[in-house]
Amino acid sequence: MENESLQHVAPADRPRLEVGERVTVEILAPAHGGHFIARHEGQVLFVRHAIPGEKVVVEVTSVVSKVTRADVVEVLEASPFRVEAPCTFARADGCGGCDFQHIAITHQRDLKAAIVTEQFERLGKLNLAELGLTCEVRAVDPAEGLHWRTRMDFAISDFGKIGFYKNRSKDVQEIDDCVIAVEEMNVPALAAKKWNGDARVEVATSSSGETNVSRGGRSLSGPTQLHEVVEGMTYTISPVSFWQAHKNAPSTLVGHAMDLLDVRPGDTVCDLYGGVGLFTGALAQAVGQKGKVHLIESDRRALSDAASIFKGYANVQIHSGMVEQLLPKIEKADLVLLDPPRTGAGEVVILSLLKLRPTTIVYVSCDPASLARDAKWITDGGYTMDSIVAFDLFPMTQHIETVVRFNLK
């Protein structure tokens, strides 16, 4: 989601930049989406591989509607936070997966905090400072930001080699390794093979050390059920079911969410967009036999896994279907946890949630723009936002995982 306030064409007396044109610019602020803002003769550019404060030469890569994008091709005055990328494919016209490898890891987190803060102020009309809040982006081991990703979805090149799509392109950058993948995945071995056809290669490595390789929904190697252990509970899931990609994300998010919710025995809790039940496991233990957890999910594979995981849990009720359709049927909720997809929960879901009047809502989000939008509706509905913490669960990329708590006034 680009910053709409910055999307405008050049003044009428100045021709717009064209694809392939090179200009010298100074880099201003970070923008949500892995870009940085620059201006040239009244035109706004969204620039990749830059850092605020730098003077660079950029090459225009696309001009679409009101948005002009460019890549850094030469650094004239470098930021003190610029480092050599640990991966040779993290470059202009290279792999489009990692946005920030050229930035010192601690500064990546500072930039992400600034992006979250700006999104809340611009889209949510919520000034964090006025609320007495500061968005902290916490490091999660491994702190250097490498070898953390347990799920990979590889594209296949015309030559049968694995790789990733280039930024905003269907061209595949072939790779021989990936520095953000967990080492147990053994990407070099996958890269050494020739793969027939264009079906993507999906690889999942569990916390138990298991690795599955699948194509087109068909398992090629490894166990067809993975065992993920979180806070002493084992989740047996399909390799293609959604699971947090960072190896330490499940325990990090569950621990923080439970601290914020302060669940008590006998509570009724809604786990919206519950997936296989990552949060439901901890919630079910906390509410006890006199409490209730409503897990709502629409994905069939996740529902199948959840049904198996919580078989025999009398205090867990699994609802199959869309949250916006099923949430109005829930009669009571003391607490609500929601972890929606990147598009967010949306107004219909938020309005249904507000009718339940839970005392506390904890919102886990992978997109600060949709989170800020939803936060506006929640606070307008009579809630106070009193906690915001982001976790660097996607280091070297522009993605951010943010957890916010809202309490009923």
Image: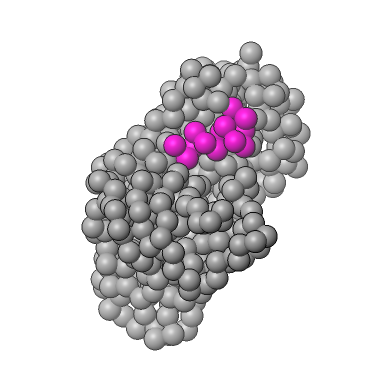
Residue 196 vs 357, above or below: the answer is below
Report x, y in % for residue 22.
44, 68
- Quadrant in the rendering for residue 94: bottom left
Asked whether residue 13 is in view, the answer is yes
State the residue at coordinates (56%, 53%). Answer: 42
Please name the predominant secondary structure of the magenta segment in the image.
Answer: helix
Report x, y in % for residue 169.
50, 71
Taking depth in this image into account, of 303 and 270 the one nearest to the observer is 270
Taking depth in this image into account, of 231 and 400 the one nearest to the observer is 400
Taking depth in this image into account, of 263 and 46 the one nearest to the observer is 46
Report x, y in % for residue 103.
30, 50
Report x, y in % for residue 250.
40, 41
Residue 124 is covered by the magenta coloring: yes
User: Which stretch did the figure color magenta?
Assistant: 114-126
Residue 82 vs 93, above or below: the answer is above
State the residue at coordinates (50%, 56%). Answer: 40
